[in-house]
Amino acid sequence: MKRSSVSIRWLFASFVIIVYALVYLPIALVVLTSFNEAAITALPIEHYSLKWYGALLENTRTLSSLWTSIRLGALSACIATLIGLMAALSVVRYRFPGRRLFLALMTLPMVAPGIVLGVSLLMFARYAGFKTGFTALLLGHTLLALPYCTFIIVSNLARFDRTLEDAARGLGASEPRVLWSVTLPNIMPGLVGALLFGFTVSIGEFVVSFFLTSAGTTTLPIRIYSIVKVGITPEINAVSTLILAATCLLTVATIRLTWSRNKT
Amino acid sequence: MALMVAYSFWSVDDNYQLIQNGNLDQYAKVFENPIYLMTLLSSVIMALLTTIFCVILALPLAWFISRSVSARWRVLFIVGLILPGWVSLLIRTYSMSLVLGEEGLLNWSLAVAGVTESPIQILFTKPAVVIGLVNIYLPYTFVPIYAAIEKLDDSILEAAENLGAGVFRRLFKVILPLIMPGIVAGCIITFIPALGEYLVPNLLGGLQGTMYGNLIATAFQGYNWPLGSALSVVLLLAIFGSLFLLSRFADVSRSLLAEQ
């Protein structure tokens, strides 16, 4: 690349800018039109206002689905982090047969098509005898968040210096105490990262939820979908803008938490 | 946990057999009705197109970011590209229709620029689905390719240059073979979810751009679970089949490139 001329560099740079613009353009449009006072979701925007955010606050159905999504996200993130922690501990610490297979199977929810995962979970729920609704959703979302949570914790655990544990043991600490006072505080960024990430995965999930919702429990994405199917409204863009902001904040926080140790 | 995943897949077959008493009627239906296979074929084509476009975009992008951007800015560039990947798929998909729709940004700008007189129909066609898929899966393709390019040793390139290899020779004989594993990983990670995509064709494809995932959903919504299961199993087989083909192809191309 040393000999490459300035013009090629500029060509490259403008290409990169165009790609970024294309990736962000649709999202920017959602955000922009949510501030449009008129009830159309198209350009040009004549008056900016927060009208649709106000309307959102009065929409009880959207609000209740938001509440469902938050509860679901928080619970599934906690469960997934807990199971992920146990899985990570066993995978990093012990060399048991089928360890690689275990990790490979773990990634299945990440790579399997959402639709297949959704319908198979629906069948599983029916087979195991629980109804679609909150419990089924919780199961599905936990399953989806689990691989991400596990891998975040695994990467943290792999970097953790185990001699610290030996030192604690040498000083007479019991095994639970070693785990609680030495190991867990040291991998805390990973745990918080896993929690946040699990929440992010859950809050944005649609396809799997689509098959597991019941009439009474709708998550926010399901609610958005049912409105968008009929027509995109500025109010929905307002909800989406809020979700976008929340997701970006959560993801950036996760990245900071999991990467900060890497650098120092 | 692994048990639960295994279980969820196992129940597809199990439930299917439970109702069907283990005969192959549903599979016969899948293979006899041309609609299913045609849709599968067009889904494969759409997913392939998506993958190709993603790679074409991701390669120069990754090259530029890893070679021409200073280390400080690099993180920002990468996060900037990956971040949309974590944003709700639903929002990203329907936001595409704001761009492609009849009153969308594209038609608006075309009209303003005076290129077209009446809005062109892009939304609810196959190109719309592919555009949507490329937009959504680009971060997925980018990450493995970037990782491969980042690992590329500059001294090898310098060696090739010193030995008199031109730009194209370096690109095809040195760079591409070395980053091929990354490209293949990027293809796989893009192709699989794109093939089974449900939401994007649902919102952007309309009737014309229906993909295979939509057929599965329709079967399940119509309470024809056995048929839906058979369709799902065929999809999974198609995915494994194409994975197999892709890995074979990658090996072949690598050895071809190496031997020349």
Image (cartoon, coloured by chain):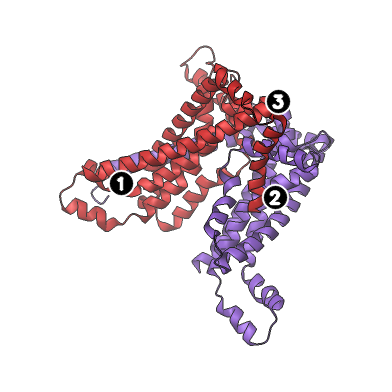
Chain colours: A purple, B red
Residue drawn at point x = 61 percent, y = 46 percent: A109
Q: Nearer the viewer, residue B245 or B62?
A: B245
| Residue position for label 3 | B224
| Residue A14 picture location, percent across and down | 39, 39
The tally of labels here is: 3
Q: Amino acid at mark 2?
A: Thr
* Vertical arrangement, residue A118 with respect to residue B80, above or below: above
Q: Amino acid at mark 3?
A: Asn
Mark 3 / mark 1, whichever is N-terminal: 1
Q: Select label 2 or label 3 by which is in front.
A: 3
On the question of residue B2 being in view, the answer is yes
As measured in the structure, the alpha-carbon distance from the residue carrying label 3 to the one carrying label 1 is 47 Å
Q: Amino acid at mark 1?
A: Pro
Label 2: chain letter:
A
Q: Quadrant of residue B96?
A: top right
Q: Nearer the viewer, residue B178 or B143?
A: B178
* Vertical arrangement, residue B209 with respect to residue A262, above or below: above
Q: Quadrant of residue B156?
A: bottom left
Q: Which mark is residue A142?
A: 2
Q: Residue furthest bottom?
A: A171
On the question of residue A59 being in view, the answer is no
* Vertical arrangement, residue B258 with respect to residue B127, above or below: below
Q: Select label 3 or label 1 by which is in front.
A: 3
| Residue position for label 1 | B177
